[in-house]
Amino acid sequence: MNFKPLFDRVLVKRTAEDTKTAGGIIIPDTAKEKPSQGEVIAVGTGSRDEAGKTIPMTLKVGDKILFGKWSGSEVKISGEDYLIMKEADVLGILE
C-alpha cells in the first residue's frame, strides 16, 4: 500500500472484537457493533500552528488506539477497509 495521510490525519485499521460475551453467549454478526479500537497504519507529518511551524504527531505507526464510535471517514484501499481520522479524534493509546 502506498498511502500517506496529510497533516494531522492518521490511517487506522479496525481490530476485530470478541464474538462471545463474558458469559459465553455468541454474538451474531447482525448484532455486533463496529469496533472502536484499531491499529495506526500510517501517520501524517503533523498540524501547523499559527506561525506555520509543524507540530509533530503524538501517534506513530503500530500504536493500538481507542477512538469514538462515529470518528473518521471509512475508505477502501487495496481492497481493505480503513478509517482516516484526525489525531484529535483519537481518545487514547492502549498499552
Image (tube, rainbow, N blue to C red):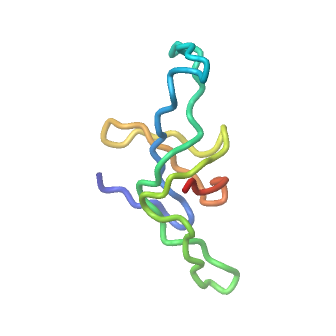
Position above or below: 41 against 46: above
Q: How many marks?
A: 0
Quarter of the figure with residue 78: top left
Quarter of the figure with residue 24: top right
The residue lying furthest to the right in this view is: 50
Q: Position of residue 39 (x, y in %)?
A: 47, 50
Q: Residue at x 32, y 36 (%)?
A: 79
Q: Position of residue 92 (x, y in %)?
A: 64, 56
Q: Residue at x 42, y 57 (%)?
A: 62
Left or right for 75, reference 35? left
Q: Residue at x 60, y 26 (%)?
A: 33
Q: Residue at x 59, y 39 (%)?
A: 36
Position above or below: 70 against 57: above
For this rendering, which residue is in front, 23 or 71? 23
Position above or below: 18 against 53: above
Q: Position of residue 6 (x, y in %)?
A: 49, 64
Q: Position of residue 17 (x, y in %)?
A: 51, 31
Left or right for 89, reference 65? right
For this rendering, which residue is in front, 42 or 20? 20
Left or right for 77, reference 35? left
Q: Indicate the quadrant containing the C terminus: top left, top right, bottom left or bottom right.
A: bottom right
